[in-house]
Image (cartoon, rainbow, N blue to C red):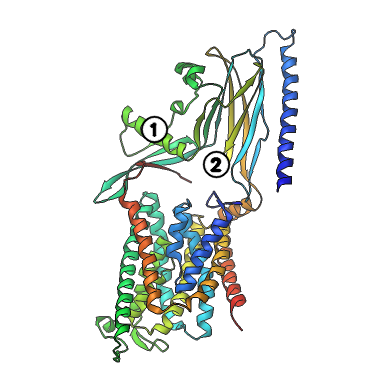
Amino acid sequence: MYIYFPIAEISLNLFIVIGLGGFIGFLSGLFGVGGGFLMTPLLIFLGIPAPVAVATEANQIVASSVSGVIAHWRRKNVDFKMGAVLLLGGIVGSSLGVLLFALLEKIGQLDLVIKLSYVFFLGIIGVLMLWESIRTYIKSRKPEFYRRKLHKHNWLHGLPFKMRFRRSKLYISALVPFFIAAFVGVLSAIMGVGGGFIMVPAMIYLLGMPTSVVVGTSLFQIIFVTANVTLLQSVQTQTVDFLLAGTLLFGAVIGAQIGARFGGMLRGEQFRGMLALIVLLVCMRIGYELVVTPIDLFSTEFLK
Amino acid sequence: MIHARFWSTHLIINQIAAIFLAALFINLFVHSPSNAQSNALVADLSQSDISINTDFNGASLLLFGSISGEQGDDIIVVISGPSSEVITRQKSYMSGIWVNSDSVKWKNAPSYYQIFTTKPLSEIASRDVLKSLAVGTEFLNLRYDSTLALDPDAYLEWADALKRNMQSASLWKTNETTVQVMRGALFRTQVSLPANITTGDYEARIIHFRAGEFIAEDRTAIAVKKAGFSAIIYHLAHEYSIFYGIFAIAFAVFAGWLAAAVFSKP
């Protein structure tokens, strides 16, 4: 059964779209990641124009983050004060990102920048995760216990506008989370992702936030960043396909629940190792496209 | 499902039969002795409005008509879609990766251009005749805009690339020997519009040839537009984009909340 998506202007098999949503939803439920970094490239592989894929995925991430945040909120794992600073940065960054997106599209380099960002960030994150999980796996065989400091002090702690974040047990300059969020916001707008896969490591390693509140707080700010991208893209490029987002959502919601049930059966480091491999696979698949000689050196697209 | 398919085939056969009868009458009338000077060509389509709704996956329609012809006459049908601005880009190899470099913006490329013929084009008429009738993508008279200075050879290379890309998107195509002519009087051909067509007014030109000579031409139109739910979404997204964006966000928030509420364990 085919369904015509009015903004993407493409007809796709309904079951493939729901299945894709379900598959990515399953992985995101299993690993606790947003899944945007997998969904957007797959939508582009399916033949959906990159601008539509990116803007529509932002719309879909709004829904999955809302449902994720509710679960974390119940367990009181959201630092709303930190979230507020992050979302301010995120809104500034993602607004810049949407402008940059339009500029890149105009000069015909949007595809390239999307692909390069994917290869670069997925590559780094994938390798780090894989290394971390292998290290943990080896360590778990010969246990050693030591008490870690809450976080290390470095030059970032000398910046002005210091604020106290009670839930995160931090007293740091608000500029640091603001600029991190702004940077991730730019990437979020260009890559069609929530940015959790960059934000979460940044919050742990750069800000020194306790891991318990990291995911909830990141999801909280992702809602606003992706909502901002959805609104700006709707107004600027009219590339948000509501019907496509809804169809993907339907599959993703169900998939995420099944994934979350399976998640309990896996051990932490096996878990991260598998996710790392998926991330690296997507990274290599996109990288391959940049490197391999195209079948036709010329490509044509319609201008609206 | 089987039932529906049976009925639709049945209806199409009926439709074709009715059309042929009608065409035959027209033809008999045109052919009557009182109408000696006859180069009448009448053509019509089984469907002149194509609606793109959410179940759209391309359309197939029947183009048919009558000619006052002889055995061995030829028909060329040219269907062209609304002209659009398209951009063709060339990739070049730069420090290990393929990057878009030069580009040519075509001002008036037809978004759809398909030719249907009784015989291979070259056997129907000479290149000069086809050129004078503007049949074929090489006679499109494309206007372009580019930072490159295109000499005739470079122009040909870029126009060729455009043609190749449009062909691989199934938008431009020459379907040779797809028009059937019966007893030099009736003709028909199946026209397929792929799912990725542009909305707007399409024009069908039907040209009658005899022994390489132009005899007659008729034109008919096809209107392709979005309809139903698909049209509503498209319209809202373009005319009320702020509200559309807010609505899309509200819907996502609601769906996310609903999912959390439904699946949370008590």
Quarter of the rendering containing residue B17? top right
Q: Can residue B131 be seen in this view?
A: yes
Q: Relative to residue B137, is residue A171 depicted above or below?
A: below
Q: Residues within 10 Å of mark 2 (few under 14, many from 20)?
A: many
Q: Can residue A186 be seen in this view?
A: no
Question: Both on one chain, marks 2 and 1?
Answer: yes
Q: Which amino acid does label 2 sit on?
A: Ile
Q: Position of residue B15 (x, y in %)?
A: 73, 32
Q: Where is residue A206 in the image (x, y as percent from the top left)?
A: 31, 78
Q: Position of residue A294 (x, y in %)?
A: 34, 45
User: Reading the chain from its start, which is encountered first: label 2 or label 1?
Assistant: 1
Q: Relative to residue B12, is residue A96 depicted above or below?
A: below
Q: Relative to residue B125, is residue A12 depicted above or below?
A: below
The residue pinned by badge 2 equals B197
Q: Of helix, strand and loop, which one carries label 1?
A: helix
The residue pinned by badge 1 equals B160
Q: Residue, x 50% and y 38% (percent of image)?
A: B170
Q: Residue, x 47% and y 73% (percent of image)?
A: A30
- Most foreground residue, A2 or A184: A2
Q: Of helix, strand and loop, which one carries label 2?
A: loop
Q: Relative to residue B83, is residue B55 depicted above or below?
A: below
- Most foreground residue, B164 or A90: B164
Q: Quadrant of the C terminus of chain B?
A: bottom right
Q: Residue B59 carries which label?
A: none
Residues at marks 2 and 1, CA–CA distance in whole angstroms: 21 Å
Q: Which amino acid does label 1 sit on?
A: Asp
In the image, is B218 to the left or to the right of B34? left
In the image, is A213 to the left or to the right of B218? left
Q: Where is residue A59 in the image (x, y as percent from the top left)?
A: 51, 64
